[in-house]
């Protein structure tokens, strides 16, 4: 009995001492600088195995640290960033019973310094739910109006005034897909016959008129892919065979610039491939493309090689052999650029020196299936 008493006393003493040493966990929140580091990058996660839980991770590629995460709903596409980085917009879908029930689509507005949701705009529950590309939602060049591509499979565009945070209208666009910024009051779309449809907006943000261009590619011969790269007012489209088709939208309506080719007789057998295979650094005026050796219809295959082209001369200047296979690539916008790569079948982000090709670091366990990468805008 005495032994039991001393054992009980000892246990009580130890518990009392342990409790005295335990300190309550201190909760804190972090505020990010209003001016982003040019090497911050958003990693948008579609989450293939549980698509109701989309996410976007903000990463500091210099330190390899995750700065924060947005919870972005079902079948998430990407963040949409104004040129001054004054807000973070996302188009999000939710169901009243999680994976079923009444559907609600919104444009969410996040504070870029706290990553907390500030407000939201209800939009028609029709935004496209597919593997994301850069042409599914965009802002006008004055950062006022947002256009979102709908596919139900009927095709239309939803227009939102993000300044007043109001839904404006849904405009039907049968046979035409994507939305590409064309100045402060217009968006263009690619149509099934190879032409482009231009939606010209009034000052109220609603469609005031439309116009249709002549075809700029033959869909029966060499179709344009939906992966694009943007350089200011010029959108770069790519065909299955590797033709580059720049479209200047600075005047509101598309102006088709001379096409040029990525591949020649010495590079027969090389193809573009992946979910995000082209990206442009506007400061160095260089185009980066993800390539692989493959046959016809391998345009979704990943690659381990990135080829870099000078946009002035349209010549390949160097190649980068990746250490890990990639489905997606993105380059930062500054004069000392970093190249980011992701494999949609595995979590994590790889960071390279975009000039030398040196692999700098892997940021592991970021996301479940990262697809679309987005460098923050360069704020001077």
Image (spheres, helix red, strand yellow):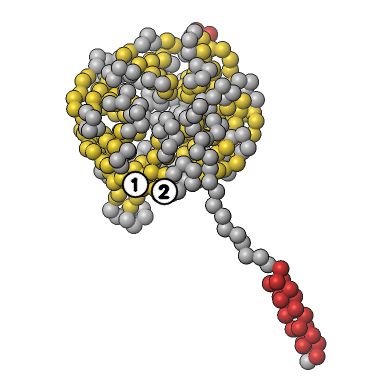
Snapshot quadrant of residue 261: top left
Query: Residue 48's x, y, as percent?
Result: 45, 43
Residue at which label 1 appears: 120
Q: What residue appears at the point 74 percent right and 83 percent down from the top-left corner?
A: 8
Query: Mark 1 touching mark 2, by CB under 8 A?
Result: yes
In the image shown, does 201 or 174 lie closer to the viewer? Answer: 201
Left or right: 36 as drawn, with respect to 89: right
Left or right: 85 as drawn, with respect to 19: left
Separation (CA) of disc 1 from disc 2: 8 Å
The local secondary structure at tag 2 comes to: strand
The local secondary structure at tag 1 comes to: strand
Query: Residue 125's x, y, as percent?
Result: 27, 44
Q: Residues within 10 Å of mark 2 (few under 14, many from 20)?
A: some
Residue at which label 2 appears: 117
Q: What residue appears at the point 54 percent right and 24 percent down from the top-left corner?
A: 334
In the image shown, does 86 or 360 lie closer to the viewer? Answer: 86
């Amino acid at each position: 009995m005495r032994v039991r008493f001393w054992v009980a006393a000892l246990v009580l003493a130890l518990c009392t001492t342990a409790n005295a040493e335990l300190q309550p966990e201190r909760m804190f929140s972090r505020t990010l600088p209003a001016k982003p580091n040019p090497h911050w990058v958003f990693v948008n996660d579609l989450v293939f195995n549980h698509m109701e839980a989309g996410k976007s991770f903000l990463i500091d590629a210099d330190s390899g640290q995750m700065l924060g995460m947005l919870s972005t709903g079902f079948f998430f596409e990407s963040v949409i960033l104004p040129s001054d980085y004054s807000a973070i917009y996302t188009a999000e879908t939710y169901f009243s019973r999680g994976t079923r029930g009444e559907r609600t689509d919104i444009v969410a507005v996040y504070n870029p310094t706290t990553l907390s949701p500030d407000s939201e705009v209800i939009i028609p529950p029709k935004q496209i739910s597919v593997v994301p590309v850069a042409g599914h939602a965009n802002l006008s060049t004055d950062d006022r109006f947002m256009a979102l591509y709908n596919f139900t499979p009927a095709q239309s565009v939803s227009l939102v005034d993000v300044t007043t945070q109001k839904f404006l209208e849904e405009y039907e666009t049968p046979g035409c897909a994507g939305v590409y910024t064309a100045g402060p009051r217009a968006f263009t779309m690619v149509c099934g016959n190879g032409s482009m449809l231009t939606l010209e907006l009034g000052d109220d943000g609603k469609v005031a008129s439309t116009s249709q261009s002549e075809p700029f590619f033959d869909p029966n011969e060499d179709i344009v892919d939906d992966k694009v790269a943007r350089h200011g007012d010029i959108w770069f489209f790519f065909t299955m065979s590797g033709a580059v088709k720049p479209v200047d939208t600075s005047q509101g309506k598309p102006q088709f610039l001379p096409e040029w080719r990525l591949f020649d007789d010495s590079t027969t057998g090389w193809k573009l491939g992946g979910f995000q295979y082209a990206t442009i650094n506007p400061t160095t005026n260089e185009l980066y493309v993800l390539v692989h050796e493959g046959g016809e219809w391998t345009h979704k295959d990943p690659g381990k090689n990135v080829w870099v082209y000078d946009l002035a001369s349209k010549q390949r200047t160097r190649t980068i052999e990746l250490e890990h296979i990639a489905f997606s690539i993105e380059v930062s916008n500054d004069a000392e650029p970093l190249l980011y790569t992701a494999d949609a079948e595995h979590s994590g982000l790889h960071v390279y020196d975009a000039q030398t090709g040196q692999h700098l670091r892997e940021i592991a366990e970021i996301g479940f299936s990262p697809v679309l990468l987005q460098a923050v805008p360069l704020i001077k």
